[in-house]
Structure formats: structure tokens, C-alpha cells
Amino acid sequence: MLPQILQAQTQKKQSATAHKLTTSFVPNGKWRGVFEIKPGIEVPFNFEITKSDAKPHLIFLNGEERFDGGIVKQTADSILVALDQFDNELAFKIAGDSLVGTLRKQDGSGKPLAVNASRGNPYRFKPNGKNAAADFSGKYDVTFKSSTGKDENAVGLFKQNGNKLTGTFLRVTGDSRYLEGIVEGNDFYLSSFIGSSPSYYKGSFSTDGSITGETVSARGNTPFTGKQNQNAALPDAYKLTFLKDGYKTLDFSFPDVNGKKVSLSDEKFKNKVVILTITGTWCPNCVDEASFIAPWYKENRNRGIEVIGIHYERQLDSAYVRKALTRFRDKFDIQYDQVIAGTPDKKIVAESLPALNNFVSFPTTIIINKKGEVAQIHTGYSGPATGKYYTDFVKEFNTEIDALLKE
């Protein structure tokens, strides 16, 4: 009898301790996290845990952006944040007033990435007291070097305020979203994280207007070089992907998550302007596009407009597809059709949409006129982090739609 009494007392004490931990640790506030992507290579990011709708949310902070990562679930000694947008999760153990844990896939696959976080540190990269050598703000012609010989041209956009540096790299496929960091002397460091994989760039500016650096990831490093040029530009995004000779439209029949086939020939789309977006829930630039298209559609659908999201997802089993597309739909309040067309491989896109020539990027946006013909194809997506590129795209998009509705 005595052992049972002692065991009950021990369990009661453990329960009381767990309750004390849960109630005493309040995660709300601003945090600085650090990933160790390689031995000795640390990538910092900032986030805030705030109470919203009676549930604590983790908000990623990158430059001007506040990106909702998800609901924070707290137990006796741990914190879990399901980063549903990218099928990842942050799993932390509470260690005093710090957090220690991993970034991992929700299904347990792949290799976890070590991460720790401390509360109240307002900086991203810890300053060493060295002032910036100059103001390196501006636009740069940039070339990312490839070991295969297929170098990639980009436009670097940087804005400096003292030692603080923000910016992005604009590419044919889309931009690098909101990067934030620091300039010390001629050296710079930039990072970003919204729940997928952490982004990390480091390099040096020169007073002659040149830039050298590399993007660093667990998969390897990619060097880049460039030169300041206020006229730096990419190829016309409206001329990269086009229809093959003899085609005027796209002919497809893809299922939604319920197995219902959707086609441009359906009665729902006749005599309407239809926007097709070739997308994927895994794609950060597609996230930016959905955050624009979803509310835009709700405001304009009554004008004779429809949208179809053509998804290419990493897995095609019905349970995964339903989960991924439903999460995407709920996050952005998507009220247009979503269909599943295959996996995110350019060859798969070419096979499933054979009328397309030279498919380049997720996302790609295709506008269909009232006759059911392709009127415009836009490759990639320049999100809000690109500033004027984004506002110009929105203006051009609305101008094209308005013109087609008048036809």
C-alpha cells in the first residue's frame, strides 16, 4: 500500500510541476531565432508570438513584412508551431527563458534543422560596432553562377539605412521576398524565413559599384557577382512563355480535391475572362500571388471573371492533396476553383499542358479572354518586396482585365 501512496504522491508532484511550467512560461513577445544550417554557419531570423483571436500566433518578421506562421501550441515543457503552409513544424523545448529545438517536416521525413531562440533581442545579425563604409542602396545587375554553366541573371534591389540593410533579388522565376540584414564596413549579411527553408546571403559591396557574394544553404553555396546599374532589368515577363504554333487556348480536364473534373470548356467559364495560375502550395512566390489573387477575385468575380488555380504538388496521394489544398484555401480564403495537375516538374507541366511552349516558373499566370483564347501569359511573380515592380504588375494586370471585359 505504501509504494502505491508514494507513487501517487510523486505523480501529483510531477503534475503540479508541469502545471507550474505551463502557467509560468508566457511565450508572448519578440524573439530572435538562429538556425545552424551547417557546422559553424548560423542564420538568424526574427519572430513575435502574439495573442490573436484568443490563440497565440507566431508572426515571422522580415523587413516590412509580418507573416503569420501559425498557432502556437504550448505544453508543460515545449512549444509546437505547425507551419502548415510548407508542411513543416517548429518544435521547441522550453529552457529557462530560451527555446531550443528543430525545424522538421510534419511527417517526420528528411533531416531536422537545429534552431534556438532567445527573447527580447531586437537585432537580426549581431552588430560589432563597425559602421558601413558607404550607402550602398540601389539597383544592381547580378549574375548567380552555376556549376552547370547555366548562370542566372537577376536584379538586386537594396535599401540601406545606417547599418541596416533590406532588399531582395528579382529573378525571372520570382523574387527572394523580404530580406533583412546588416552592413558592416563593406560586408553585408541578409536572411529571411517564413516557414520553408531559411534564406541566407552574404557578400561585399565595393565603392566602385560592384558586388560579390554567395547564397548559403544546407545544400550548398551559390556565388554571385554584380554591378550597380539603375537601368538593370530582366527579360520581359510577358514574352518568356507562350503558346505553340497552331494553338489559341489550353485544353485540360483536371480534378479538384473531390475528384470533380474542371475544364475551360465548362459552362461556368463561358463568355468570361478566366485567370489560370500555375501554382503550388510549397512555393513562396505562389504564396505572394495567392495573397493578391484571392481577395482580388472576391472583389471582381461579379464582373464576369473566374480563376482556376492549377496546382502541381510534391505528393499526389488524395489525403496529402486534400490537406495541402485545403490549408492553402483556408489561409487565403480562396473562393475560386483549385485543381491538381501533377508534381512540380517542368516536364510534367509540359506534358499536362501541351499547348505551352517554354514553361519557366511557378507561378505562371495565364489570362483567357471571353472567346476562350489565351490573351496574355506572365512568367514568375514580383511580390510586394519588390516595391515598384509589384505595383507596376498590379496596374498592368488590372489594365489587361479591364480591356478584356470590354471586348
Image: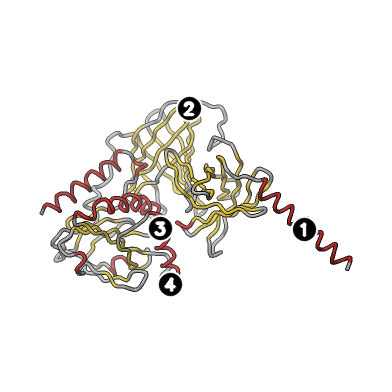
Task: Tell me the number on the disc at residue 317.
Answer: 4
Question: Mark 1 is on which residue type?
Answer: Lys
Question: Mark 2 is on which residue type?
Answer: Ala
- Image location (x, y in percent) of residue 164: 47, 32
Image quarter for residue 324?
Answer: bottom left
Q: Secondary structure at mark 2?
A: loop
The answer to which of marks 4 and 2 sits earlier in the sequence is: 2
> Front-most of 210 and 48?
48
Q: Which residue is mark 1?
A: 12
Question: Mark 3 is on which residue type?
Answer: Asp
The answer to which of marks 3 and 4 sits earlier in the sequence is: 4
Residue depicted at x 46% and y 39%: 180
Q: Which residue is mark 3?
A: 330
- Image location (x, y in percent) of residue 303: 19, 54
The answer to which of marks 1 and 4 sits earlier in the sequence is: 1
Q: How many marks?
A: 4
The answer to which of marks 1 and 3 sits earlier in the sequence is: 1
Q: Which residue is mark 2?
A: 132
**Which label lies toward us, 1 or 3?**
1
> Front-most of 139 and 319?
319
**Which label lies toward us, 1 or 2?**
1
Q: Residues within 10 Å of mark 2 (few under 14, many from 20)?
A: some
Q: What separation in Å lies between label 1 and label 2 (alpha carbons)?
A: 58 Å
